[in-house]
Amino acid sequence: MPAPFKPHEPIRGVAVDQGSGLAAAIAAARGADARDDDLETFKRIVVETASPVATTLLVDSTYGPHLLPLMAPACIPMLAFEADVYHIADEDRITRLPDNLTLEQFPALGAPVLKFFLYYGPNDPPELNQRKFDLVRSIGNRCRAQGTTFLFEPIVYDRAVSDGASKEYALLKPELVRRAVEDFVNPDYKIDILKIEIPVTLDFVEGFGTPAMSRRDAEAAVVDVSNAAGDMPFVYLSAGVTYERFVEGLEFCKSSSGKAAGYMCGRALWSDAIGIFGSEGANAMARWMETTGRDRLAGMNEAIA
């Protein structure tokens, strides 16, 4: 894997690349005090408080170019190459590329890592998935040509089960994640690292929630995904769960012998800071991030160590 990530160094990453969904949550929390620059202010606070203790930090294509210079020197900057992921057509679920940013600008911006997100349904029609394969391959080729590290994030789904929080989907999820990993470890895509979901939903695993899956089967699912990755490094994403649930998930994967290179967390870290920012302002949020936020990062580090 090319620099900047080293195989022996764990990845302890923070993501604040969310767009319109986060903006709406902040506006609701701020109420009458909402300002046009609230989203950028929120992201700036996350960058300034988390980058000194994270190994890498991901920002979005809109605000990211202005936030990259604010990162701590030892933190590896990561920039998303996508428009707002909330504005994706339901039919093909193909990520729109940003209008304000080209891939070739990444080196000059000081972003050595590109992250690209894509919804991927292994059971979708082959013609649709071929379009997605072609898009990922194109991005990978362009990254490799200029020495930019390519982190790819496939978020799986199945059209037959629309409710991703259901027991039915929880039973499908391990296979979907495994198949996505199997498909994208192909060196033809020139992906350097995968950012993937924890392959089991703990809410339906024996010992954690309403048991639809035994602990042994869940452990096997984690190992299957690790094996499917082969030599490809991968990190787990928090996928919007609470801090406590993400820590449990990291601990479970670690105890199951999942060989993850680390994690990337977003809402599991800073979701509670939205209310503080809304009711008490930017300074209070910064204090929360420097105390509770950093404690949460330490807890995640311990969980996967």
Image (cartoon, grey):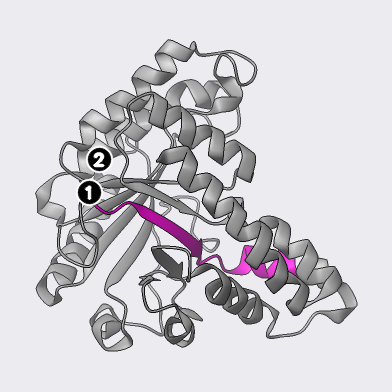
Amino acid type at circle 1 is Gln
Image position of 216 with respect to 5: above or below? above
Q: Nearer the viewer, residue 281 or 154?
A: 281
Q: In this view, does 3 lie to the left or right of 264?
A: left
Picture quadrant where residue 95 is located: bottom left
Q: Tell me where residue 41 sits by quadrant.
A: bottom right
- Crowding at label 1, few (<14), some or many (≥20) Cα neighbours within 10 Å? few
**Residue drawn where x is 53% and y is 51% of the image:** 298
Q: Residue at x 63, y 59 (%)?
A: 293
Any part of residue 162 in sight: no
Closer to the camera in the image, 54 or 169: 54
Residue 130: mark in rendering: 1
- For the residues bearing labels 2 and 1, Cβ distance under 8 angstroms: yes
Q: Find out whether residue 300 is within the magenta segment.
A: no
Image vertical order of residue 126 relative to residue 280, above or below = above
Extent of the magenta region: 8-27
Where does the image place residue 81, in percent across and percent down from the top left?
36, 70
Within-10-Å neighbours for mark 2: few <14, some 14–19, many 20+? few
In the image shown, does 70 or 123 lie closer to the viewer?
70
Please state, as top left, top right, bottom left or bottom right, where the C terminus lies in the image: top left
Label placed on residue 126: 2
